Structure formats: structure tokens, C-alpha cells
Image (cartoon, grey):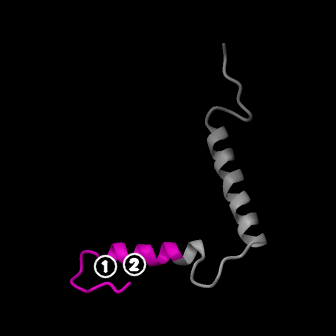
Amino acid sequence: MSQAYLISKRMDPLFGMAIGIYGYYLYEKEHPRPQGKRLQELMMKRWKIRNNAGSSETIEK
């Protein structure tokens, strides 16, 4: 039995990810988070913590 695809075998996962990201964007636009708790700000904070983990500086929480 052959598998059914919406677009193609390789494009279906990309299409699914695009729909999910767009859905998240619409949800965040409709229900905004407080300042400092947005996904982009949390990711930047996490990125800075990981990049500074090898340095001798102390990370304050």
C-alpha cells in the first residue's frame, strides 16, 4: 500500500513545520506574553548563558 502525501515526501515535513510556526505566531499575536517572558527574549537569555558557561564569569539568575 502506497503512502499518501499532501505535497511530496520531502515537502510534507517542511509544510507541517511552516504551519506550526505560523500557528504559534498567530497565537502569540492574539495572546501576548509579558515583557521579558517572550520566546525570543528567553532564547537570547539562554544563548548568553550557554556562551558564557565556559568563561570564568559568574552568571546571575
Residue 23 location, quadrant: bottom right
Identify the residue position indicated by label 1 in the image. 52
Quadrant of the image occupied by residue 29: bottom right
Badge 1 amino acid = Asn
Left or right: where 31 falls relative to 38: right
SS assignment at label 1: helix
Q: What residue appears at the point 71 percent right and 25 percent down from the top-left corner?
A: 4
Q: What segment carries the magenta color?
A: 42-61
Q: Which mark is residue 48?
A: 2
| Identity of the residue furthest to the right in this view | 30
Q: CA distance from mark 1 to mark 2?
A: 6 Å
Quadrant (top left, top right, bottom left, bottom right) of the N terminus: top right
As for residue 58 lying within the magenta part, the answer is yes
Label 1: few (<14), some (14–19) or many (≥20) C-alpha neighbours in 10 Å:
few
| Image coordinates for residue 57, horizontal then vertical, percent | 25, 86
CB of mark 1 within 8 Å of CB of mark 2? yes
Closest to the observer, 4 or 28:
28
What amino acid is found at the position of numbered circle 2 in the picture? Lys
Q: Eyeballing the image, is 46 above or below 12?
A: below
Count of numbered circles on the image? 2
Give yes or no for residue 59 being in the magenta stretch: yes
Secondary structure under badge 2?
helix
Around disc 2, counting alpha carbons within 10 Å, would you say few (fewer than 14), some (14 to 19), or many (20 or more)? few
